[in-house]
Image (cartoon, rainbow, N blue to C red):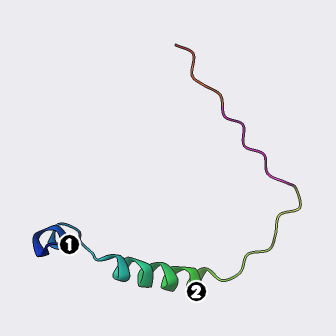
Amino acid sequence: MSARFADAFWPPADELAEAAERIRARLGDWPTGTAAWRLCVAAPDV
C-alpha cells in the first residue's frame, strides 16, 4: 500500500477500533430482550 493511499483514510482503522472498544465499555452489558426480533424486508414498489 502506498503512503498516499494510507493518507487518504482518516482516522486509521486501529484508532476507529480503539474508539469502538471504549464506546462498548461505557455502554456495558444490556439485558436480553423478552421477545424475539423479526426483520421483514420487501422490495419497493416501482
Nearest to the observer: residue 29 or residue 10: 10
Magenta residue check for 39: yes
The kind of secondary structure element at disc 1 is: loop
- Residue 18 location, x and y as percent? 43, 85
Relative vertical location of residue 18 with respect to residue 45 in this rendering, above or below: below
Left or right relative to 26: residue 14: left
Residue farthest to the front? 1
Circle number at residue 19:
none
Q: Which residue is mark 1?
A: 1
Amino acid type at circle 2 is Ala
In the rendered structure, the answer to whether residue 10 lies left or right of residue 2 reads right
Depth order, front residue of 22/5? 5
Q: Residue 25 bears which disc, if any?
A: 2
Of all residues, the one furthest to the right in this rendering is 34
Nearest the camera: 3 or 7? 3
The percent coordinates of residue 21 (x first, y second) are 51, 83
Majority secondary structure of the magenta segment? loop
The picture quadrant where one finds residue 3 is bottom left
Q: CA distance from mark 2 to mark 1?
A: 32 Å
Q: Quadrant of the N terminus?
A: bottom left
**Three-letter amino acid code at disc 1?**
Met
Residue lying at 23% horizontally and 68% vertically, measured from the top left:
9
Magenta stretch?
A: 36-41
Residue 17 sits in which quadrant?
bottom left
Residue at 88 percent across and 56 percent down: it is 35
Image height check: is 15 above or below 10? below
- Mark with earlier residue (2, 1): 1
Q: Nearer the viewer, residue 42 or 35?
A: 42
Q: Residue at x 61, y 80 (%)?
A: 27
Q: Residue at x 27, y 75 (%)?
A: 11
